[in-house]
């Protein structure tokens, strides 16, 4: 199944999952950290793989002029329902409805793991950016996606049973607060993202590895495991 087919099928469930207290706390933490990478609002920000629009809404609240796109029509319908004044469009990540050099910021927040054509997406983002424009990426950390903890204790071993270096799938079924969701992402090593940026002529200028904050551990001691390993990876690159 393609990533588009998966996320179109799961769109309604994703919107419900995004509203759970658990996911809102994670988005609050990771979203705040991600926003720190962004330059101030400029001419145009493109939010690629916007889903039901949670990051787009935060960007608009901060004064960014945003074009938000997603390949899944149901995601765009849900985003428009939550933000009728926003600018949303159905579009593939490798074929953005943006003129060459029209944007000064392109963001992929937790969406590049769901893009089948990584090189095409990064290449088209670079095309849409003006010189000096920024490309900001937030993903599940490639190490976190490659293995699993063998227990919930703070010292539980983290084991990678397959190959970190080869592309694979990250599949997880979760259920919380009466809401179930099925993740089926593409797992890639860090080098894959770096090479895609390199081939598109982009230069990485910031890297952030995010471990769980103390506030999460205070609520649930099992989160202490994620203070030994990063859960998310955020990158910023510039078009020279």
Image: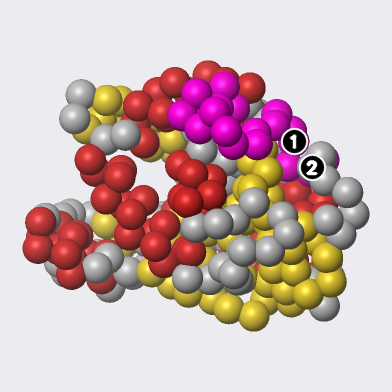
As drawn, 21 above or below 74:
below
Name the residue carrying label 2: 96
As drawn, 214 above or below 66:
below
As drawn, 177 above or below 27:
above
Choose between 174 and 132: the one closer to the eye. 132
Nearer mark to the viewer, of 1 and 2: 2
Disc 1: CA contacts within 10 A as few (<14), some (14-19) or many (>=20) = some
Name the residue carrying label 1: 92
Is-magenta flag for residue 66? no
What is the secondary structure assignment of the residue under circle 1? loop
Q: Residue at x 65, y 34 (%)?
A: 88
Choose between 12 and 45: the one closer to the eye. 45
Position in image of residue 134 (x %, y %): 69, 68
Q: Considering the image in quadrants, where does the C terminus appear?
A: bottom right
Indicate left or right for 187 with 95 as reference.
Answer: left
Start-end of magenta stretch: 76-95
Is-magenta flag for residue 87? yes
Indicate left or right for 231 with 34 as reference.
Answer: left
Q: Residue at x 59, y 36 (%)?
A: 86
Q: Residue at x 39, y 62 (%)?
A: 32
Position in image of residue 85 (x %, y %): 57, 33
Q: CA distance from mark 1 to mark 2?
A: 6 Å
Q: Residue at x 16, y 64 (%)?
A: 215
Contact (CB < 8 A) between labels 1 and 2?
Answer: no
Position in image of residue 202 (x %, y %): 77, 71
Disc 2: CA contacts within 10 A as few (<14), some (14-19) or many (>=20) = many
Indicate left or right for 63 with 204 as reference.
Answer: left
What is the secondary structure assignment of the residue under circle 2? loop
Q: Residue furthest right?
A: 100
């Amino acid at each position: 199944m393609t990533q588009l087919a998966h996320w179109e099928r799961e769109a309604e469930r994703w919107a419900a999952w995004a509203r759970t207290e658990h996911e809102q706390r994670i988005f609050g933490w990771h979203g705040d950290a991600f926003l720190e990478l962004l330059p101030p609002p400029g001419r145009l920000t493109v939010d690629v793989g916007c889903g039901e629009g949670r990051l787009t809404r935060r960007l608009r609240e901060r004064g960014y002029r945003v074009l938000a796109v997603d390949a899944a029509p149901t995601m765009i319908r849900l985003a428009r329902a939550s933000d009728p004044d926003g600018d949303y469009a159905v579009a593939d990540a490798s074929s953005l409805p943006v003129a060459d050099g029209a944007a000064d910021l392109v963001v992929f927040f937790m969406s590049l793991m769901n893009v089948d054509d990584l090189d095409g997406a990064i290449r088209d983002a670079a095309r849409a950016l003006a010189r000096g424009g920024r490309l900001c990426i937030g993903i599940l950390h490639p190490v976190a996606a490659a293995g699993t903890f063998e227990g919930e204790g703070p010292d539980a071993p983290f084991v990678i049973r397959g190959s970190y270096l080869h592309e694979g799938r990250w599949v997880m079924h979760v259920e919380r607060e009466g809401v179930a969701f099925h993740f089926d992402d593409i797992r890639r090593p860090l080098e894959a993202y770096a090479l895609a940026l390199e081939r598109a002529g982009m230069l990485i200028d910031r890297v952030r590895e995010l471990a769980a904050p103390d506030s999460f551990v205070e609520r649930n001691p099992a989160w202490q495991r994620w203070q030994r390993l990063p859960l998310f990876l955020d990158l910023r690159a510039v078009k020279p």
